[in-house]
Image (spheres, rainbow, N blue to C red):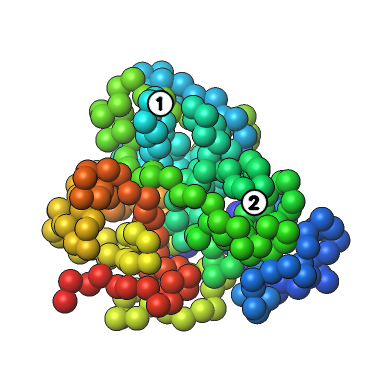
Amino acid sequence: MRLIPTIAAFCTAASMSVASPEFWAFEWPNTDFENTSVENWVEIMSGGPPKDGIPALDNPEFVTVADGPDLLPREPVITLEIAGETPRAYPIRYLTWHEIVNDVVGDIPVAVTFCPLCNSGITFDRRIEQGTLSFGVSGKLRNSDMVMFDRETESWWQQAIGEAIVGDLTGAELDTLPSWMESWSSFAERNPDGLVMAQPAFRRQYGANPYVRYDSSNRPFLYSGEMPPHDIPALARVVRVGDAAWPLTRLSEAGELTEAGVTFTWHEGQASALDAARIGAGKEVGNVRVRDAAGNDLAHDVMFAFAFHAFWPDGAWMLGQ
């Protein structure tokens, strides 16, 4: 596996530091480390960048599809379609470098998130009982998954499960909104009047993939947990709905599959964001839509198998056997 130096540089002794409240108290003076659901601090590691070293985006600007950025047809975007609102596309070429977008769609404050190391793209409602939160990137990883933090209490949140794991809000959960990854061409053809996030005003190599060939590697980055069962490769993609996971290869072979009250449709045309040096030139992974029996879009995640096993160790593997 070849990694671009910006990511390879993370593999230093400092980036391998094991978390401890004493070690991070200076950086996180407002975080209540006594209040946590984490049983073993060894699970949490530094990914390299410090707090806000990967800058989350706030109140992004949008342009129309017709005036959109010069995306390649197969480039992945996260699509968010909320009833009564113009559909929005959040290009992975931007989320790769920012990981969180704090936005407001209609009257719903949302956090569109992408963890490259888990291929996990999830959209959350930022409202909880205690109020509306805004999120940043902590620079920490747990089971190779991004640990977010809210700016209001500086509690730490696990991106894959949308739950606070350290701090005042420990145990609080975010509602997940239906969103999905698809190719730019799929979004644009279906939504000619849609909106797409404009390029952020940062100096980044947007469109470049800093994780070259990552999803062809044998082991995840900064992960020491168990490998998936059933001889499933650690970085094989699975579609998680609730606490069940369907291998993407199974769905691509079927094209359409209805099982356990869920209907999946798959068609080709989306590039992997974690393969080639240019995101839009990645290997084929295809487009997946997930709907319930009434045809409504369901919240789901297309993530790596190791991450599903790490966060849902008793989850169901829908192998069709």
**Residue positioned 58% across, 38% down in the render:** 102
Is residue 74 positioned above or below 292 on the image? above
Position of residue 155 measured from the top left corner of the image (x, y, whole percent): 70, 56
> Which mark is first along the chain, 1 or 2?
1
The crowd level at tag 2 (other Cα within 10 Å; few <14, some 14-19, many 20+) is many
Which quarter of the rendering shows the N terminus? bottom left
In front of the other: label 2 or label 1?
A: 1
**Residue positioned 30% across, 44% down in the render:** 297
Residue under pointer 1: 85
Residue 138 badge: none
Is residue 295 positioned above or below 160 on the image? above
Position of residue 139 measured from the top left corner of the image (x, y, whole percent): 66, 57
Is residue 111 positioned above or below 7 on the image? above
Q: CA distance from mark 2 to mark 1?
A: 28 Å
Which residue is most to the front?
A: 129
Give whichever of 70, 63 is nearer the camera. Answer: 63
Q: Is residue 57 left or right of residue 35?
A: left
Label 1 is placed on what type of residue?
A: Glu
Dot 1: what SS?
loop
**Residue positioned 59% across, 47% down in the render:** 128
Residue under pointer 2: 137
**Residue positioned 22% across, 72% down in the render:** 319
